[in-house]
Image (cartoon, rainbow, N blue to C red):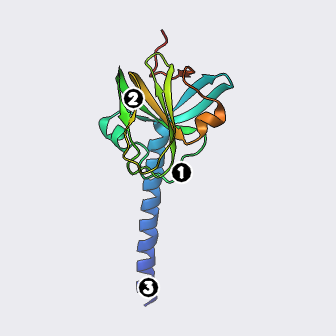
Amino acid sequence: MTKRASWPAAKVILVAAVVALCGLALQSARAAQMQTLEIVSKTGVHVFSVEMATTEKEREIGLMFRKSLPDGQGMLFDFTPEQNVTMWMKNTLIPLDMIFIRADGTILRIAENTEPMSERIIPSGGPVTGVLEVSGGTAQKLGIAAGDKVAHPLFKRR
C-alpha cells in the first residue's frame, strides 16, 4: 500500500516540475522580447524596459488581463509605417498612459490615466509609428510631455 500511495504523489511532483519548467520557458521567451527605450524630457532621461507588440495579434492583445505593470516597464506597439491609430482599454485591468510617438521619435500626444475596461476609442491625433503604454500616472510623475524625444530603433532621427 505504501508504494501505491507514493505513485500519485510522484505524479503530482512530476506534473509540478513540468509546469515549473514551462513557466520558466515562457518567462525566458518574454524576457527575450524586452528592449530598452529612452525618453529625453526636461526632467532628464527616463529608461524603460519594453515588450514589443509587432504582429497584429500582439497589438490586439496588448496589456489585456494584466493585473499590474511595474514602474519602468511598458509595451511598445509598432505601427510602421507611420499612420493614424486608435487604441482602447477593453479587457485592460489597469490604468495606462498611452504615449503616441511620430516616426522621428517625437511624442505627439499623451492620453493619461486611461480608464480600465473602457471601449472608448483613444485616437493618436495624427500619424504615429509607435504607441508606448506605461502605468497610468507615469508621464505626469516623470514630467514626460508632447514634444519630448524617444530613443529606440523603431524611431528614425531626421
Q: Could you say which disc has been placed on residue 78 in the image?
A: 2
Q: Residue at x 43, y 61 (%)?
A: 19
Q: Secondary structure at mark 2?
A: strand
Q: CA distance from mark 2 to mark 1?
A: 22 Å
Q: CA distance from mark 3 to mark 1?
A: 41 Å
**Above or below, 99 relative to 93:** above
Q: Position of residue 97 (x, y in %)?
A: 52, 38
Q: Secondary structure at mark 1?
A: loop
Of 44 and 12, the residue lying toward us: 44
Q: Disc 3 marks which amino acid?
A: Ala
Horizontally, residue 42 falls left or right of residue 16, namely right
Q: Position of residue 134 (x, y in %)?
A: 53, 39
Q: Residue at x 40, y 23 (%)?
A: 128
Q: Position of residue 8 (x, y in %)?
A: 41, 79
Closest to the camera, between mark 3 and mark 1, is 1
Estimate how packed mark 2 is, as few (under 14), some (14 to 19) or many (20 or more) residues with alpha carbons within 10 Å.
many
Mark 3, residue position:
5
Mark nearer the N terminus (3 vs 2): 3
Of 146 and 13, the residue lying toward us: 146
Q: Position of residue 122 (x, y in %)?
A: 40, 36
Q: Could you say which disc has been placed on residue 68 in the image?
A: 1
Q: Secondary structure at mark 3?
A: helix
**Above or below, 73 relative to 40:** below
Horizontally, residue 21 falls left or right of residue 55, namely right
